[in-house]
Image: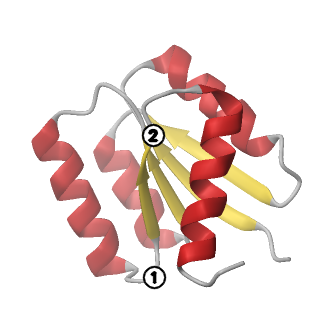
């Protein structure tokens, strides 16, 4: 299985750090995290991303605009809203989405 590239976006630094640690704990996953959507967009434009995780404290309009930007720029990207629930739930959400899209 190829290594999946993740981009995490959230405004709560503590939660973002936990998500980053959880995602990077899987040897087939590699994540980078941002708390600023403009920096995240720049990284997204310059790198192939498989999954975008949207975390807590993002304003609704920013979430919608960032999701639209991601899907327009890289239509095959998976955008997942994750607002907590522990490592088991996070991994299940990701694997479920990949399974539904036939990517695993």
Residue 45: % across, % down: 41, 70
Q: Residues within 10 Å of mark 2 (few under 14, many from 20)?
A: some
* Quadrant for the C terminus in the image: bottom right
Mark seen at residue 90: none
Q: Is residue 48 visible?
A: no
Front in this rendered view, residue 41 or 19: 19
Mark 1 vs 2, N-terminal side: 1
Q: Quadrant of residue 58?
A: top left
Q: Quadrant of the N terminus?
A: bottom right
Q: Which of label 1 and label 2 is nearer to you?
A: 2
Q: CA distance from mark 1 to mark 2?
A: 19 Å
Q: Residues within 10 Å of mark 1 (few under 14, many from 20)?
A: few
**Looking at the image, can residue 103 be seen?**
yes
Q: Which residue is mark 2?
A: 82
The residue positioned 53% from the left and 27% from the top of the image is 16
Q: Secondary structure at mark 2?
A: loop
Name the residue at 36% across, 26% down. Answer: 11
The colour scheme is secondary structure
Q: Tell whether 42 sits left or right of 8.
A: left
Task: Provide the residue designation for mark 1.
Answer: 76
Q: Is residue 31 above or below residue 100?
A: above
Q: Residue at x 27, y 79 (%)?
A: 72
Residue in the picture at 29% in, 48% down: 38
User: Does 88 sit above or below residue 41?
Assistant: above
* Mark count: 2
Residue 56: x and y in percent read 36, 28
Percent x, y of residue 34: 46, 38
Judged from the image, the secondary structure of the residue bearing numbered disc 1 is loop
Where 43 falls versus 18 (above or below)?
Answer: below
Question: Among all residues in the image, which is located at the extreme left?
Answer: 61
């Amino acid at each position: 299985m190829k290594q999946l590239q993740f981009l995490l976006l959230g405004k709560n630094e503590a939660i973002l750090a936990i998500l980053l640690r959880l995602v990077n704990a899987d040897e087939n996953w590699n994540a980078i995290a941002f708390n600023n959507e403009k920096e995240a967009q720049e990284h997204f434009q310059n790198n192939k991303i498989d999954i975008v995780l949207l975390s807590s404290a993002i304003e609704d309009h920013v979430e919608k605009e960032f999701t639209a930007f991601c899907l327009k720029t890289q239509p095959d990207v998976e955008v997942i809203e994750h607002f907590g629930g522990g490592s088991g739930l996070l991994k299940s959400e990701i694997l479920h989405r990949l399974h539904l899209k036939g990517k695993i």
